[in-house]
Amino acid sequence: VQLQASGGGLVQAGGSLRLSCATSGRTGSSYSMAWFRRAPGKERSFVAAIRSGGNTYYADSVKGRFTISRDSPNDTVYLQMDSLKPEDTAVYYCAATRPLASARAHYSTANYNYWGQGTQVTVSS
């Protein structure tokens, strides 16, 4: 399974970006997909996840501003980021895993088997 993230860039505060994660290999539409991010000097942290059935989960810091979605026929996951803030500056990573038993399990990096290479998002003030 390979994941390829794209769509990062430099944007002013209040602006928007859309990240894409193209998957290849034997992921299947049953996999859960997620986005994590690593800000400078910090650990990698959960941003959003989506189950195969469409249930979504978000970190409190991005609720109401970010939207995760998936295009199953094309094996692509998106992260629409609106009202961006300087504190959203980070390298964003997409991840995939076989179906997880609980909602809470989606929040942990340890539960994801496959990772993309990361894409840089920089939000200027």
Image: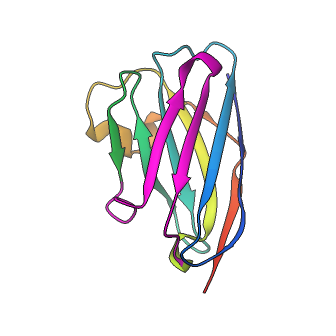
Percent x, y for residue 65?
Answer: 42, 61
**Residue that appears at 63% across and 49% down:** 19
**Residue that appears at 39% across and 28% down:** 51
Percent x, y for residue 33?
Answer: 49, 33
Query: Colour scheme of this structure image?
Result: rainbow
Percent x, y for residue 36?
Answer: 52, 51
Can you say which quadrant of the picture contains the C terminus?
A: bottom right
Q: Quadrant of residue 28?
A: top right
Residue segment shown in magenta: 59-85
In this picture, residue 25 sits left or right of residue 71: right
Tell me: residue 97, above or below residue 16: above
Q: Quadrant of residue 57?
A: top left
In this picture, residue 65 sits left or right of residue 23: left
Can you say which quadrant of the picture contains the N terminus?
A: top right
**Residue that appears at 34% across and 59% down:** 63
Instruction: Please tell me whether residue 56 belongs to the stretch shown in magenta.
Output: no
**Residue extending furthest bottom?**
125
Instruction: Please tell me whether residue 69 belongs to the stretch shown in magenta.
Output: yes
Percent x, y for residue 59?
Answer: 36, 56
Tell me: residue 122, above or below residue 18: below
User: How many dots with numbers?
Assistant: 0
Q: Nearer the viewer, residue 86 or 38?
A: 86
Q: Quadrant of residue 102?
A: top left
In this picture, residue 78 sits left or right of residue 98: right
